[in-house]
């Protein structure tokens, strides 16, 4: 039997998932990471993008994640994110609308510019994943 992880997917409102998985792949702020059993402990900052996990029966499930943090400790993977949506629930038209709004929004100062850029990145990631389904 293959080794397994306990996978926790948590948002500020609720624990969305608490299950056993074989592997996980997700978007960090600076690239992709794949996690298999035996991984050294780590903490990583998540980006906006896709999270894919393979359950113990071999099926894969895909989610859009909206930043946050990933922790691997022992056989537990914890993902803390602002928002997690199954890819099947993403709407390309809504993502396009969010991107247009973020592109059109004026920004003055570093904080507003950073927020606008973050919203643009989020909307682009949502749009890309919505168009892949």
Image (cartoon, helix red, strand yellow):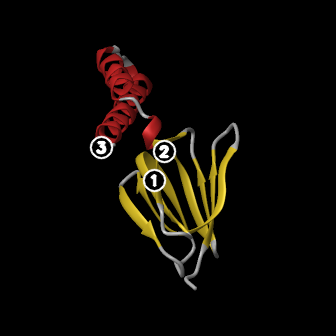
Q: Position of residue 1 (x, y in %)?
A: 58, 85
> What crowding class fits label 2: few (fewer than 14 Cα within 10 Å), some (14-19), or many (20 or more)?
many
Q: CA distance from mark 1 to mark 2?
A: 7 Å
Q: Can you say whether 96 is above or below 32 in the image?
A: above
The answer to whether mark 1 and mark 2 are in CB contact below 8 A is yes
Q: CA distance from mark 1 to mark 3?
A: 14 Å
Q: Position of residue 113 (x, y in %)?
A: 37, 25
Q: Give the mark, 1 or 2, whose residue is nearer the N terminus.
A: 1
Q: Which residue is mark 3?
A: 132
Q: Quadrant of residue 108?
A: top left
Give the farthest residue toward the bottom.
1
**Residue 51, numbered label:** 1
**Residue nearest the viewer, comparing 72 with 56:** 56
**Residue nearest the viewer, comparing 64 with 28:** 64
Q: Give the mark, 1 or 3, whose residue is nearer the N terminus.
A: 1
Residue in the picture at 32% in, 34% down: 127
Residue in the picture at 35% in, 37% down: 130
> What crowding class fits label 1: few (fewer than 14 Cα within 10 Å), some (14-19), or many (20 or more)?
many
Q: Which residue is mark 2?
A: 65
Q: Quadrant of residue 126?
A: top left
Residue in the picture at 34% in, 42% down: 129
**Residue nearest the viewer, comparing 6 with 106:** 6
Q: Is residue 131 left or right of residue 52?
A: left
**Residue 7, numbered label:** none
Can you tell which of label 1 and label 3 is closer to the viewer? 3
Q: CA distance from mark 3 to mark 2?
A: 15 Å
Q: Can you say whether 88 is above or below 9 in the image?
A: above
Q: Which quadrant of the rendered structure holds the C terminus? A: top left
Can you tell which of label 3 and label 2 is closer to the viewer? 3
Q: Is residue 49 left or right of residue 2?
A: left
């Amino acid at each position: 039997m293959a080794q397994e992880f306990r996978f926790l997917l948590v948002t500020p409102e609720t624990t969305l998932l608490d299950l056993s998985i074989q592997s996980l792949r997700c978007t960090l702020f600076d690239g992709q990471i794949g996690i298999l059993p035996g991984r050294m402990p780590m903490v990583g900052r998540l980006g906006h993008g896709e999270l894919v996990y393979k359950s113990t029966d071999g099926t894969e499930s895909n989610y859009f994640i909206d930043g946050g943090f990933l922790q691997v400790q022992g056989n537990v993977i914890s993902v803390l994110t602002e928002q997690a949506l199954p890819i099947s629930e993403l709407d390309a038209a809504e993502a396009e609308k969010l991107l247009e709004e973020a592109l059109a929004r004026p920004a003055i100062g570093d904080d507003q510019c950073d927020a606008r850029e973050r919203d643009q990145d989020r909307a682009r990631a949502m749009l890309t994943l919505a168009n892949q389904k």
